Image (spheres, rainbow, N blue to C red):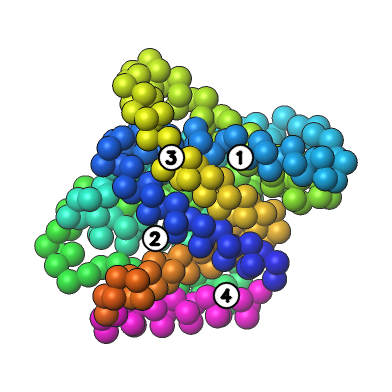
Amino acid sequence: MLWAVFTLIAAAAQTARNAVQRELTATLGTVGATHVRFLFGFPFALLFLFGLLAVTGSTLPEVPAPFWPWAVAGALTQIAATATMLSVMGQRSFVVAYAYIKTEPVQVALFGLVFLGDHVTPLTGTAILIATAGVVVMSLKPGAAEASTTRSTVIGLISGALFALSAISYRGAILSLQLSDFVLAATFTLAVGLVIQAALLSLYLALRDPKVLRDIMRAWKPSLFAGFMGAFASQFWFLAFAITSAANVRTLALVEVLFAQGVTRFIFKQPTTAREAIGIVLVVIGVAVLVWAY
């Protein structure tokens, strides 16, 4: 169950990263806030990689041709997924879009079966549906129906699909290396993915909106933290992807919603509603069934 430990660590780190990145959206815009996690994350990913090589005495792996399409696809779909998610943050319809974004585990299971042959047992499929339903129940707050628009629904589903494709692509890249050392395979893939993302978005902003790059550098302190937490979370996501199917990982990752709920309850002293309590119970049941099935 090492993958479960990795996933829980990643989910906790991502909760902290998301909070900082959401604040940066107000000052840097959607593209700028998206770029922060990549631009300030890739140096840490390289540190992780070369630190691992120094400690283990390993060398950089030989990269087979199939690795590159998977890695590039993972990098591009993650950029697009993050941008679409951030684009609806702060809007009244965000709760609706967020609920659809969190259908990601269901989409991951489907894409994993199609592209990687990752089979889902009936019990695991049931766990995925229960946990996903719990997140949707928690996300759709009273008044969300009035805020719902076709646009928010479509954006949420597209963002969830892009996150799912990113997870599948990165798992495909990790597996294509065919390394016995899963830590090296995951760490190398992460470093390559973040370098691709940082280079592409930096080039785009340099050509289209250099002011955003300057604004990012001015906001380097929160950006540095967001970048580190992004790289740290991704390191553990990738370690989990190297061990088990992306569907298992992304379903267990729904506990991130519970972490966020805990922050709201204990730090901001906001009570848990009956609807949120039902959602929490469903997520816990779904996760428990997933772990038991595994």
Residue 4 is situated, as x and y percent measured from the top left of the image, at: 63, 68
- Earlier in the chain: of badge 2 and badge 4, it is 2
Cβ atoms at labels 4 and 1 below 8 Å apart: no
Residue 281 counted in the magenta span:
yes
Where the N terminus falls, by quadrant? bottom right
- Reading the image, the residue beneath label 3 is 221
Indicate the amino acid at tag 3.
Answer: Lys
Residue 96 is situated, as x and y percent measured from the top left of the image, at: 25, 59
Q: Nearer the viewer, mark 3 or mark 1?
A: 3
Question: Residue at (22%, 50%) from the top-left corner?
Answer: 90
Q: Nearer the viewer, mark 4 or mark 1?
A: 1
Indicate the amino acid at tag 4.
Answer: Leu
Which mark is drawn over residue 174?
none
Separation (CA) of disc 3 from disc 1: 15 Å
Separation (CA) of disc 2 from disc 1: 28 Å
Residue range in magenta is 272-294
Among the 4 quarters of the image, the one containing residue 132: bottom left
- Reading the image, the residue beneath label 4 is 290
Q: Nearer the viewer, mark 2 or mark 1?
A: 1
- Earlier in the chain: of badge 3 and badge 4, it is 3
- Earlier in the chain: of badge 3 and badge 1, it is 1
Q: Residues within 10 Å of mark 4 (few under 14, many from 20)?
A: many
- Reading the image, the residue beneath label 2 is 102
Indicate the amino acid at tag 2.
Answer: Lys
Q: Nearer the viewer, residue 252 or 222?
A: 222
Q: Nearer the viewer, residue 123 or 105?
A: 105
